[in-house]
Image (cartoon, rainbow, N blue to C red):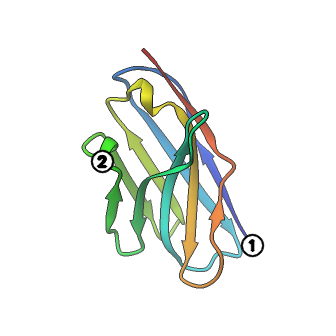
Amino acid sequence: QVQLVESGGGLVQAGGSLRLSCAASGSILRLRDMGWYRQASGKQRELVAVITYSGTTNYIESVEGRFTISRDNAKNTVDLQMNSLKPEDTAVYYCHAQPFVGRDYWGKGTLVTVSS
């Protein structure tokens, strides 16, 4: 069993920055992909950014150039640096991890609120 714990959410004004962190613990296998999803009120959960074990990254178009995902394989952590935040970035952000073998895992989420 793997537990994912997020931190770093909060309230920020438009144009500001936040850094989300996620730490994986428990019976950790090597984590193939680690990523961040978000779900705004009344909308479906969407993938924001993902990073593979080898460091390849992928972002949704709306955050390209503003968000940066990074990970530490030794510590089983993944961070999301969010700059130039916009009100439309307001959502609950969820950490996600997919091991090379077995099922995937989700964190409980952290709320990011961007005021205009």
> SS of the residue at dot 2?
helix
Percent of width and height locating residue 60: 35, 51
Relative height, residue 25 to residue 20 (above, below) = below
Which quadrant does the N terminus fall into? bottom right
From the viewer's side, name the closer residue of 110 and 37.
37
Relative height, residue 80 to residue 84 (above, below) = below
Relative height, residue 68 to residue 28 (above, below) = above
> SS of the residue at dot 1?
loop
Q: Is 55 on the left-hand or right-hand side of 96?
A: left
**Mark found first going from the N terminus, 2 or 1:** 1
* Outermost residue, right side: 1
**Within-10-Å neighbours for mark 2: few <14, some 14–19, many 20+:** few
Q: Residue at x 65, y 59 (%)?
A: 106
Question: For residue 30, what is the image quadrant?
Answer: bottom right
* Outermost residue, left side: 65
Identified by mark 1, the residue type is: Gln
* Outermost residue, top side: 116
Which quadrant does the C terminus fall into? top left
Marks 2 and 1, Cα distance to the nearest angstrom? 33 Å
Q: Residue at x 39, y 43 (%)?
A: 81
Percent of width and height locating residue 65: 24, 43
Identified by mark 2, the residue type is: Glu
Q: Which mark is residue 61?
A: 2
Q: Residue at x 45, y 64 (%)?
A: 72
Count of numbered circles in the view? 2
Report the mark closest to the observer, 2 or 1.
2
Percent of width and height locating residue 5: 65, 52
Percent of width and height locating residue 22: 56, 53
From the viewer's side, name the closer residue of 70 and 35.
35
Q: Which mark is residue 1?
A: 1
